[in-house]
Amino acid sequence: MVSRAAAAVRTRPRREREQEVLVWPDLVFIEFISALIFSIALMVLSAMVNAPLLNRADPDTTPNPSKAPWYFLNLQELLLHMEPAWAGVIVPTIALVLLAAIPYWDRDTEGQGVWFGTKFAGRLAVFGFTAATLITSLLIIWDGSLHVVWTENIIRGLGLNSDFSWPGGLDWFRNLRGFDTGIPWDSLGFTIGGFTMFADWRAIPLGIPGTTTDPWLLNLNFPSFLSQQIIPVATMVGLPVLFVLFCKALGWIHTRRDIALLIFSAFIGVYLTTTIVGTAFRGQGQDLKPPWDIVVLEE
């Protein structure tokens, strides 16, 4: 008795020659043309753009800026904005675990293998990518104090003095260069029963002096803890939640796949933004600069 599988193989229609795509010449010819165009473009750019070579590699001399390979530049960018343990270990580990958990969390078989397989998938992808890219760029600009530079340039462009005071209390925006430097922490202490509380926010005692030699347990630099740990973690957790709630209020989210698509699109936006900024907008001392002003210096 012939099995159903064998019968299905025998009755499968034979593909015609016109329906086949061969490696040669179809694929190899396209690859050859692409390689040729790439080589010509590289030669033209090499002739037109000055890319001076540095000195021979020296393990005792580090160039400035010293950058990681392009696929790690996003992590190097995160190192500038948060605690190294979070940026280098915890955040990448959590991201990889969440990406690997998507197939186990979304077990619906309907529409598998289909691009944008849900009703509002296109809107979710565009919103997630655009919003994450814009917010990430604004956060990088704020943390790099570019808003201060732009504000001072506007004041000078208007012919005003550097001590010009913005109306409506907007001076805080010009002066706020980060939560650890823009807030007058020295003046935020208060007195209770003749005892001054939090007189020095950069050295809040957490342990009993004499019982431990660990300086982190003896005192806490609250401004640094706030800017390097609390705010980045709250942003990374809070923004995805706000994205989901906002899109759900618009009626775009109906399944788990919608949520996964939204978060993944936002992740791609953050990944590309941090990679591009780390590649093209970080100059000497990892300062934010336009690409045409970046010069690599030998230390």
Image (tube, rainbow, N blue to C red):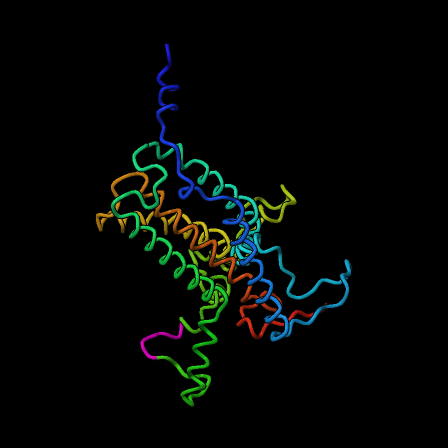
In depth, the one of 96 and 79 nearer the eye is: 96
Rendered view: 264 above or below 296: above
Q: Which of the 4 image quadrants contains residue 293? A: bottom right
Q: Which of the 4 image quadrants contains residue 98? A: top left
Q: Could you tell me which residue is drawn at 43 percent across and 51 percent down?
A: 268
User: Main SS of the magenta segment?
Assistant: helix
In depth, the one of 168 and 288 nearer the eye is: 288
Q: In this view, does 223 lie to the left or right of 234?
A: right
Residue 245 in percent (x, y) is at: 28, 48
Q: Could you tell me which residue is drawn at 36 percent across and 49 percent down?
A: 240
Residue 246 in percent (x, y) is at: 27, 51
Q: In this view, does 285 lie to the left or right of 78?
A: right
Q: Could you tell me which residue is drawn at 47 percent across and 59 percent down?
A: 273
Mark yes or no: residue 88 visible. yes
Mark yes or no: residue 183 visible. no
Residue 198 in percent (x, y) is at: 48, 57
In depth, the one of 57 and 163 nearer the eye is: 57
Rendered view: 142 above or below 237: below
Q: Which of the 4 image quadrants contains residue 294? A: bottom right
Rendered view: 50 above or below 72: below
Q: Could you tell me which residue is drawn at 29 percent across and 52 percent down?
A: 123
Residue 64 in percent (x, y) is at: 66, 66
Rendered view: 4 above or below 92: above
Range of magenta residues: 167-172
For the C terminus, which image quadrant?
bottom right
